[in-house]
Image (cartoon, rainbow, N blue to C red):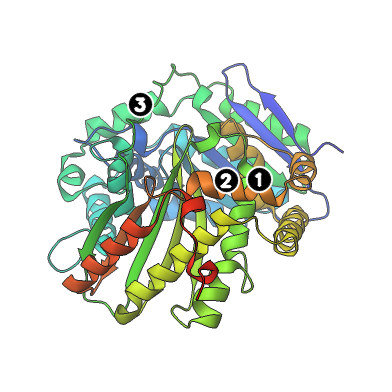
Amino acid sequence: MPEYHIDTLSNGLRLVTVEMPHLHNAELVCYIGTGGRAETEEFAGISHFLEHMLFRGTERYPNSRALEGAFEALGGAVNASTDGENTCFHSRIHPAHAAAGIEIFSDMLRNPQFNDLEIERRIILEEAREDYNQQGEQTNPDNLMATLLWPEQPLGYPLIGSDRSLHAINLEALRDFHRQHYVPKNTVITCCGPIKRQDILAATQKFWGDWFGGETLPPLAVLPLRSGPRQQWAFDSDSQICLQLAFPMAGRRDSRPLHFSLLRRLLSGGGSALLPHRLREECALTYAVEANCSMLEDTGYFSIDLAVAPHNLVPALDETLKVLTKLRQAAPESTALEAARIGYLYDLEFSLDQPEAMTTRYGWGLQADCLRTLEQDRDEIKVIEPEQIQALARELFTAEKLHLVVVGPWEKRQKTEVKKLLQAFDSNPRCSPSASDRPE
């Protein structure tokens, strides 16, 4: 049986189906290829604002309660999310009612009534306040990092928008953005579960086939990133300090997605991974540390996040940089790499029981032009060598690429100490032995 099927309607809309007959629930997802990088500064946050407004009802379902109740009657739990390049609408659905779910999504995304604009504006303003301290200063590490990486560019604006832009967004702007970006050629529908391809295709043709719209504008290219190390500090009266380190990447244009996945797992893929083992188990500097990859079409970054007690800020950063330096200096042990590889292969197998994971792999993968099969991943992950991971670490973890965000109750003296640590983080690992390798 093929892993997936792709069908393209005459209007350009693409459908991905994954037949998973052993399951008892299905996942239905609609990807719209637009997000934060398509916005202007005046209307920053409009993608997310529009996502909210589509829940406000259609002619058939006149308000949010009626619309969400229609999904719930099918076993659904509709939700949505917005990122830099995509807006995603998704719901679990009972497989016997998948066609009805496709019909409701069609009505929701194509025929919004834009009801209760001012109510939704107040809701989003409340949501946005979660990212600010009592002085009205931004304290969300992800938002601060985006501003640090892409200053004065759409990718650097908070996805939720600013107080100013959220008040500026009006009905006309929402309708224009919807008309420009919510078009068939910009849409991928994915259904995964115990469904039949032909049934889903027939329903999609019935409820989406008469939808027509123009071409969307290509996203704005990002400007070159400034050389690091660069820092952004925000004070917040909390019990911990949040640190985020980020190293820019080439995004999905890089041909080594599995190398990055293995590197991430080596660093934080479990309690025995390099960062948790050193920072938590050996040094007791943090409870949790996590590495992640954010890969957009032509840019992105590899990040490391941790939260520490204020007095542990400098030693935690110091130990983190030492782990990265050691990985640049020497290839990871073959046993550690094999453990990360096995963990990845296990997760591939586990995803066969997770329809939401399949919608991401094949639906988002098609929308993002980086669709990879399970078979491809299995074959490619097996041949990655320790020396290739070391080479990637040398390329990625350099002083010139290092960006740091610190949020919490830090002290002025700590900024001076952190600056010294960053200056000592030599971009040439062959000339900068780690503390554990220096002679006594």
Whether residue 311 is visible here, answered yes or no, is: yes
Whether residue 359 is visible here, answered yes or no, is: no
Badge 2 marks a residue whose secondary structure is helix
Looking at the picture, which amino acid does disc 3 mark?
Leu
User: Depth check: 111 or 433 in front?
Assistant: 433
User: Counting residues from the N terminus, which is met first, the one under dot 3 or under dot 2?
Assistant: 3
**Extreme-left residue of the structure:** 135
Q: Nearer the viewer, mark 3 or mark 2?
A: 2
Question: Badge 3: few (under 14), some or many (20 or more) residues near its Cα, within 10 Å?
Answer: few
- At x 35%, y 55%, the residue is 142
Q: CA distance from mark 3 to mark 1?
A: 32 Å
* Residue bearing mark 1: 388
Q: Are marks 2 and 1 in contact (CB under 8 Å)?
A: yes
* Residue bearing mark 3: 220
User: Depth check: 346 or 334 in front?
Assistant: 334
Q: Which mark is residue 396?
A: none
